[in-house]
Image (cartoon, grey):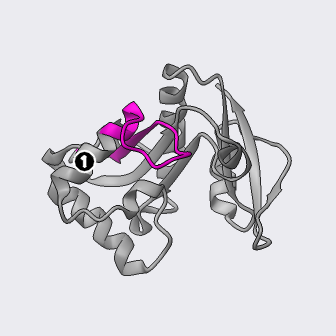
Amino acid sequence: MEESLRLIKPTTALKRQYLAFYEEWIQTGEDMIPWFIKKDPTDFEKMVAFLHDSEKGEGLPPGWVADSPLWLVNQTNEIIGAVSIRHELTPLLTNSGGHIGYGIKPSARGKGYATKLLQLALQRAQELGISKALVVCDHDNIGSEKVIRKNGGIQGKDFVEDDGNIIKRFWITI
């Protein structure tokens, strides 16, 4: 991939680009991953402020941890994907969330963006002091499993959720 991609903190300067990204997810009806892209962007400035606070661990619901929400953008500032890097693990995150949750908008999948996104996210995780990152995916998400393995993921013990869904857990030494 020759395209220049980078991770940036959410910013009000890219409101138009973010709303296009968000609307594409809404139109598909797919589950929106990572968690923060489910947030209603109607009050865009408030949403961006909340995301900045979550990085500081402020204003979070009980049991949540500080995380770094980031957007993957190309050279024209089109938002291709998003990632949440959790600064620490709770028992729930150890089982089924991991350190890093990421998603690529539907129209951009299958082009290598997720592999690059995870690579960049692992660099950021290392800057946060994480030396061994847990990255998970559903057992039937073959694309995500390939991305994780391409980035050095070594499969650990699976976790079975209450509804029977199997979560594959991978550790990546950074």
Seen in the picture, residue 29 relative to 58 is either above or below; the reply is below
Which residue shows up at 76% across the image and 69% down it?
165
Vertical placement of residue 12 versus 66, above or below? below
Residue 149 is at least partly visible in this image? yes
For mark 1, give the secondary structure.
Answer: helix
Quadrant containing the N terminus in the rendered view: top left
Residue at left offset 21%, top offset 47%? 76
The quadrant the C terminus occupies is top right
Horizontal and vertical percent for residue 123? Answer: 51, 27
Which residue in the structure is indicated by mark 1? Answer: 48
Whether the magenta-drawn stretch holds residue 71 is answered as yes
Magenta-drawn segment: 53-75
Asked whether, in this view, residue 150 is left or right of residue 165, the answer is left
Q: Depth check: give the residue in front, 69 or 142.
A: 69
Three-letter amino acid code of the residue under disc 1: Val
Q: Residue at x 69, y 54 (%)?
A: 145
